[in-house]
């Protein structure tokens, strides 16, 4: 456990990186958990821009009313490349001190956590991270806020595509988000009854997918759904479709789900996770913890050092991918 010795009376909270459904529920929980412990809270706007430009708002219980069910983040978020420069972080640290803020809670993904970590290491500002990203790509926590909603949003679309695929006897490739991670893809693959899932880290050859489609045709399947994680190249589903056409003459329709996966009302699971994590982060700062993120392992909330969380990639779950194969014959 990494500890600080600063008495915490006033905290700042911000959302950073890609937005994720449930971020509002996390802010609400941070604010109300902090107020319950007689702390003052301010919310910084637009991620690290808020810290650099002193764009903030004091947050009271009523400031976070009626947001638990809303997607996005009412504090707004941002990708702020300037924050990667130490001299810019020094300005942010000076602003934080000037505002009398004793600790920060960062809701975001791995990039955002790198920024938070730098504030602790370089300026000794206590920080706690709350993992909020639809990608679920943070090592050390089973889940991140937003993942469950994003998977369900994608699944809803996949179910609809299945209707039209079956009616026309068509092959579809559905591309889902996740950047370098195959987590959204592998969960959608199993839950959506897909024939094959292309992830960035566990290679599946087009030949293998084609063979699977052929076997399906022989056994009487008239439509198939393949799921592709966007990987480093959003739009790669078009390349896959072209390769399949060249090898088989089959036309694959492509559907790229895109940013709709980031929006919408958070699921019950995400709201509960966000509420629990928000509370835990406040309590952890009060206990003297820093340089860590809240994680869920099984059903337990724990603190994981940011260094550890940032040290590894979270792999695609082989078991889910295997089961998708077994169940799609
Ligand atoms: P996410 O947090 O979802 O992974 P990004 O990778 O875009 O999203 O990171 C969000 C923000 O975190 C960046 O725009 C930048 O402000 C900050 N950040 C990312 N990497 C670093 C880093 N190495 N050092 C300091 N700040 C960083
Ligand atoms: O990290 C969340 C995420 O939605 C990724 O799945 C996706 O690759 C990326 O953000 C898209 O980022 P942007 O909002 O900059 O288009």
Image (cartoon, rainbow, N blue to C red):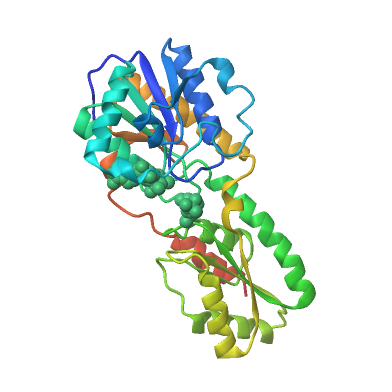
Residue 76 drawn at (x, y percent) = 51, 35
Residue 176 placement, left or right of 192: left
Task: Give the residue furthest to the left.
Answer: 122
Residue 203 placement, left or right of 28: left
Quadrant in the picture for residue 272: top right
Residue 31 drawn at (x, y percent) = 49, 21
Asked whether 58 or 55 is in front, the reply is 55
Asked whether 85 or 174 is in front, the reply is 85
Evaluate whether residue 96 shows in this view: yes
Quadrant in the picture for residue 210: bottom right
The residue lying at 52 percent from left, 56 percent from top is 184
Evaluate whether residue 290 shows in this view: no
The residue lying at 50 percent from left, 71 percent from top is 236
Residue 280 drawn at (x, y percent) = 42, 26
Instruction: Judge whether 311 appears above or below 258 on screen.
Output: above
Residue 266 placement, left or right of 184: right
The residue lying at 22 percent from left, 39 percent from top is 86
Instruction: Judge whether 217 appears above or below 286 on screen.
Output: below
Instruction: Judge whether 158 appears above or below 11 on screen.
Output: below
Instruction: Judge whether 292 appears above or below 141 on screen.
Output: above
Residue 153 placement, left or right of 124: right
Residue 267 drawn at (x, y percent) = 62, 40
The quarter of the picture where the C terminus appears is: bottom right
The quarter of the picture where the N terminus appears is: top left
């Amino acid at each position: 456990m990494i500890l600080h010795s600063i008495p915490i009376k006033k905290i700042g909270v911000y959302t950073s990186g890609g937005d994720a459904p449930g971020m509002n529920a996390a802010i609400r929980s941070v604010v109300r958990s902090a107020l319950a412990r007689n702390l003052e809270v301010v919310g910084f706007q637009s991620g690290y821009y808020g810290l650099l430009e002193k764009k903030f708002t004091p947050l009271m219980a009523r400031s976070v009313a009626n947001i638990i069910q809303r997607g996005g983040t009412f504090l707004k978020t941002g990708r702020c490349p300037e924050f990667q420069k130490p001299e810019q972080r020094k300005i942010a640290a000076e602003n934080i001190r000037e505002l009398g803020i004793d600790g920060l809670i960062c809701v975001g993904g791995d990039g955002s956590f790198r920024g938070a970590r730098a504030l602790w290491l370089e300026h000794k500002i206590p920080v706690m991270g709350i993992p909020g990203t639809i990608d679920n790509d943070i090592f050390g926590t089973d889940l991140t806020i937003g993942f469950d909603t994003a998977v369900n949003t994608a699944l809803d679309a996949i179910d609809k595509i299945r209707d039209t695929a079956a009616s026309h006897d068509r092959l579809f490739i559905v591309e889902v988000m996740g950047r370098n991670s195959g987590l959204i893809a592998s969960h959608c693959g199993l839950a959506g009854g897909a024939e094959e899932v292309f992830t960035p880290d566990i290679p599946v050859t087009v030949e293998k997918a084609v063979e699977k489609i052929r076997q399906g045709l022989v056994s009487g399947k008239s439509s198939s759904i393949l799921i592709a994680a966007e990987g480093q190249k959003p739009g790669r589903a078009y390349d896959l479709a072209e390769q399949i056409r060249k090898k088989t003459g089959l036309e694959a329709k492509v559907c790229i789900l895109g940013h709709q996966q980031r929006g919408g009302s958070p699921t019950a699971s995400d709201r509960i996770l966000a509420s629990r994590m928000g509370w835990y982060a406040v309590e952890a700062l009060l206990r003297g913890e820093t340089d860590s993120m809240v994680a869920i392992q099984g059903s337990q909330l724990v603190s994981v050092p940011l260094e550890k969380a940032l040290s590894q990639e979270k792999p695609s779950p082989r078991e889910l991918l295997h089961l998708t194969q077994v169940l799609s014959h």
